[in-house]
Image: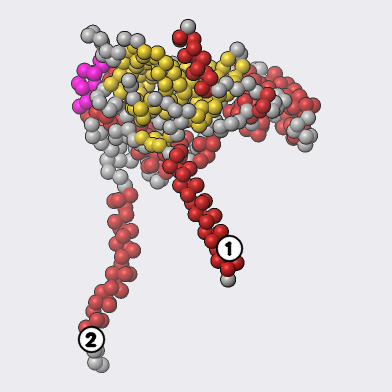
Amino acid sequence: MVVVKKPGTRSLSAAVIIACFLPILLSAQETPLDAPPPLIISGVNQAVIIDRLIAARAYRNIKAGRPADHGIDFALLDKEMERYRPELEKFDPAYYGVLWETYERMKAYVTDPNSDFVRAVQNPGSVEFEGRNPLPAAAFVDTASQAMNATPPGRGTHEVNREAGRSIGELEPLLSDKAKKTLSDISAMPETTVSAREAKLRVIEEEIAAWEKNCDRLEAAVMLEILRGMCAPVQPDSTLPRIDADALFQEEITRETR
Amino acid sequence: MKLFLSARLIKYTALGALVFSLLLCGTVWAASFTPPGGQEITYNPSGNFDVPILRDGSVTYTHVDQSFSLILCNGYGDVYYLNMLRERNNYQAYKGYVKYRGFSLSGCSTTGEVVMLRIKATSVMPEYFSIVSTSVRWGSTLYILNDVFRWLNSTTMAGYENWYPFDMSCSVAMYIAEGGFS
């Protein structure tokens, strides 16, 4: 058998081989690219937001299915923080202590796989943080989180209050079967009727009264308050008092000049 | 043929107008600031949000859509919109509004009112700032955040944050996103 090698054959077969192996080569290169380099502090401007940088890295790690502290060497970061300590203490002797506390809090969040931070990333909206939310900016890009936190412009007070409060649906798992059944019957009634709202409120009030021995009374009181807000008759937006922002400033300036 | 051409013309004109209006919306709304070494923060320079205000025992809402002489933001992504109301030799007083991104206790409004004091530098003390901002919870309770900070270097201010009724404190970094101090 005679194999005739044409001049273009060799380059063609090389191209075919490259085409076949290119995806494999690329995917092999993805792994080191995917894993970001270790977190380091590159200056005092980053040292003062170290907790934010850790939060952003941990968020990306959790979303990518890696442990939250992947690529975060806390021994290294401790040393880095120590490096900026003289500069920060010179700026303000008390400041470094508060910064260190903030850093330690974030470190605890990230190194514990069951921490509130980790759970909040894995299941958005499942954890309520008392005050500062440690989640990074990326978490708020998520539309669900935005919808949860946003105060939509141009909405009436009652509407916004109702959205800010918990919904009856959210409270339902906490109620007894009897209360659930009653609420289900009431929900069949038209939402707008005063009697339906009052009936809903009565059921919830009775339920909360029955919780006295096994429920935090303060929490119950707060829930009752929310429900009262929810069950209040809806006022049209036009009847709600509004303060114009410019008028507010003008009022202040007038007071100043008196 | 003429009819076909005019229909096509109308179609392309409408499409062009749509693209142009989308471009306009995008450019007018968007402003962003990236703190040194941090994450980008996007905001609307004129606000365009509602702020709950507790007054005489009830909540009213004011819509914020105006110009501001100073826009600050912090490392958590909260944006403070301020105008100067008073200037004295040793201090300045500012007032405005805030849109929170990193303060999200359930039922707490994500917008609030702000007052800021800028205490000017003296021979014995450097310049520093104090911000008090509000958030209304469940439409009935006023939460107050207090930030005290001063210039760490030419780009970054650093300080402390405390809030009422809880007392969790943390460090905070503040930046000028737009405008400036006079």
User: What residue is drawn where x is 37% and y is 21%?
Assistant: B170
Graded by Cα atoms within 10 Å as few (under 14), some (14 to 19) or many (20 or more), the crowding at tag 1 reads few
Chain containing mark 1: B
Residue of label 2: A5
Furthest residue in direction top, as rendered? A258
Circle 1 is placed at which residue position? B7
Are there few (<14), some (14-19), or many (20+) residues within 10 Å of tag 2?
few
Residue furthest out toward the bottom: A1
Q: Is residue A183 visible?
A: yes
Which amino acid, mark 2?
Answer: Lys
Identify the element where label 1 is drawn.
Answer: helix
Answer with the quarter of the image where residue B123 lies: top left
Residue drawn where x is 33% and y is 21% of the image:
B181
Q: Chain of mark 2?
A: A
Q: Residue at x 75, y 33 (%)?
A: A191
**Distance between the alpha carbons at the discs numbered 2 and 1:** 60 Å
Residue at image x 68%, y 24%? A239
State which region is magenta: A82-93
Position of residue B141 measured from the top left corner of the image (x, y, whole percent):
56, 17
Camera-near label (2 vs 1) is 1
Task: Identify the image quadrant of residue B101.
Answer: top left
- Residue B78: say if magenta: no
Please state which amino acid type lies under the numbered disc 1: Ala
Horizontally, residue A58 falls left or right of residue A176, namely: left
Q: Tell which of A26 and B136 is nearer to you.
A: B136
Residue A137 in the figure: left or right of residue A177: left
